[in-house]
Image: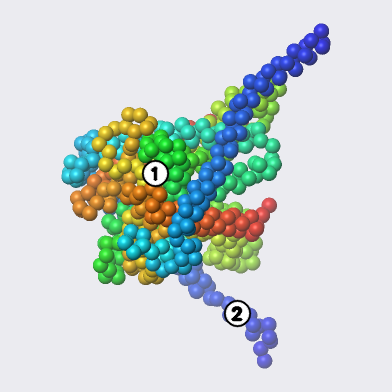
Amino acid sequence: MANLIAEYSRNRRLRQRMREAPILAFLFMCALASIGTTVGIVIVLLEGALQFFREVPVFEFLTGTEWTPLFSNKQFGVLPLLSATVVISFAALAIAVPVGLLTAVYLSEYAPEGVRSIVKPVLEVLAGIPTVVLGYFAISFINPTIIKPLFSTETPFTALGAAMAMGVMLIPMVASLSEDAMRAVPASLREGAYAVGSDRFQVSVKVVVPAALSGIVAAALLALARAVGETMIVTIAAGSIANFSANPLEPMQTMTAYIAQVVFGDTERGGVEYQSVFAVGLLLFIFTLSINMLAQAVLARFREIYD
Amino acid sequence: MIPAIARDRPIPMSRTVRKARGTAFILLAILATSLGMVALAALLLDVLRDGIGVLSLEFINSFPHYQAEKAGAKSALAGTLWVMSLTAVFAMVAGVGAAIYLEEFAVRNWFTRIVEININNLAGVPSVVYGLLGLAIFVYWMGLGRSVLAGALTLALLILPIIVVAAREGLRSVPPTIREAAMALGSTRWQAVRFQVLPAAMPTILTGFILALARAVGETAPLIAIGAFTTVLFVPTTPTDSFTVLPVQIYSWISKPLPEFRENAAAGIIVLLVVLMLMNAVAITLRNIYSRRSRW
């Protein structure tokens, strides 16, 4: 009898396990999907890029200073797109990092709870504004009412206009990530500084900010990756001519904006312009991935653990 | 003669200078904080000023047109609705499935570590790269064409990492005693997850899910890449129809040289922002309802 019961329950467990095996397999497939996405991205980009590099030598692509794929005399030097990406991203960071950091210091060290409960949701709303809207904001407000009178520019598209809109996009990100890092600094550090005679400014700037530095640097790096990969703002507001220049008052085309321009038009599949998109995409992917990994490494390596 | 120690010590700052420095810094910080808010206000006012005149029921209920004043956002709204419904299904199933596997079943080993690192890195891939992936895989390789289905699959992959992270957080917030109690009463691990853990974690999962979906609603670049059409004169009726969505329609109006289309773009933006606001309101309400009701 006891044997029978034991066998019955063993069988029951076995049957249950059999029944649930497909479910488990399905869940496992779901977890695999994320790996599949990465593999897919790498294969798609590599394959397109390799085809492109059969037509255009890698060296020419990486060192050329002329990008004219839509002209009759096609030139595929990526440096103009790269320089535009660098100029616009760093201009955007030059706005977003100081503003975001000061916002974070204010929210973490100074703001009364009432102010915080207003500012935080507003920043969340700002973070949720689609980038196509920020692009519109750049050409309909920032360029005509800020940049034009200030620098007496002529063009409706400037790198600076796009960078400013991008800066606005990045402020909430930098502010919220830095604030998290500052709030993780234990109160005892602040109290210790007060006890030896520091004032609030010294506690904020010389104790809390250095203690949260790894988080702040990571925030800036993540913002940089986001800026490099941002597409719509630059597509709308920075112009559509590749321009090897460091002058932010000129129009220029970034890597992402070039991709958007080509895929938006009906470019023939298999043509060299179509393939160039994947080569530029691969470069973009490598950049953003490296910056992201650097940010994670900074967090892992330099995080101060306070207990 | 002055002793060396005293000589090297910095001259102490007077009380007034310290106070002035403190006040100046507070003012600077407040200025910086208000900058973000001022930018948001300027953006909203700018869009309202340009678009409110065009916005009407007729605008929402008309198809695109070569004359700006006759053009509307009907097909774009319908396309957004179509794509989002499918994206929601794909992303929810795959995202929650992956989260359940990683949180509830997987043994911590090199595989789960790789999946985790991979999800972190995927969250940082630019959306336009997802567009290229969708173009090569869904549109051409799988032969789905420039269809609603291809768009939805692309966006689902894009928001998958966000949903996985939110769902894992939700599952982790359910105390292990719940699982142990269920299994002590004879349920299998899956039954415990399916009938106890998942329902308890649902509010957190749903909140993250809606916020992720809101991000997908505003995405433009990946859908441009997979070729969402800009002039769609019909409402899609099957997942294989071609389509456009609100952000792509807005972009196409912005890029038209005629200035009248700017007003259409602004009106489209207002519609888009209202849709996003509604989604956020739902998410916040959910969070508030369930955070008041703690069950453990």
Q: Amino acid at mark 1?
A: Ile
Q: Secondary structure at mark 1?
A: loop
User: Residue A185, relative to residue B215: is it above or below?
Assistant: below
Task: Name the residue at 31% across, 53% down.
Answer: A136
Residue sitting at the far top: A1
- In x, y percent, where is residue A277? 42, 54
- State yes or no: discs 1 and 2 in contact (Cβ < 8 Å): no
Task: Name the residue at 63% across, 45% down.
Answer: B114
Task: Judge if badges 1 and 2 mark residues of a common chain.
Answer: yes
Residue A223: mark in rendering: none
Q: Which residue is mark 2?
A: B10
What is the quadrant of residue A27 in the picture? top right
Task: Name the residue at 26% across, 70% down.
Answer: A152
From the viewer's side, name the closer residue of A115 and A300. A300
Residue sitting at the far front: A54
CA distance for labels 1 and 2: 64 Å
Q: Chain of mark 2?
A: B
Q: Is residue B102 visible?
A: yes
From the viewer's side, name the closer residue of A126 and B87. B87
Q: Secondary structure at mark 2?
A: loop
User: Marks 1 and 2: which is nearer the front?
Assistant: 1
Which quarter shows the N terminus of chain B?
bottom right
Q: Which residue is mark 1?
A: B226
Q: Amino acid at mark 2?
A: Pro
From the viewer's side, name the closer residue of A57 and B57. A57
Q: Is residue A303 visible?
A: no
Which quarter shows the C terminus of chain B?
top right
User: Residue A213, relative to residue B245: is it above or below?
Assistant: below
B145 left or right of B65? right
Task: Name the residue at 29% across, 48% down.
Answer: B252
- In x, y percent, where is residue A306? 66, 54
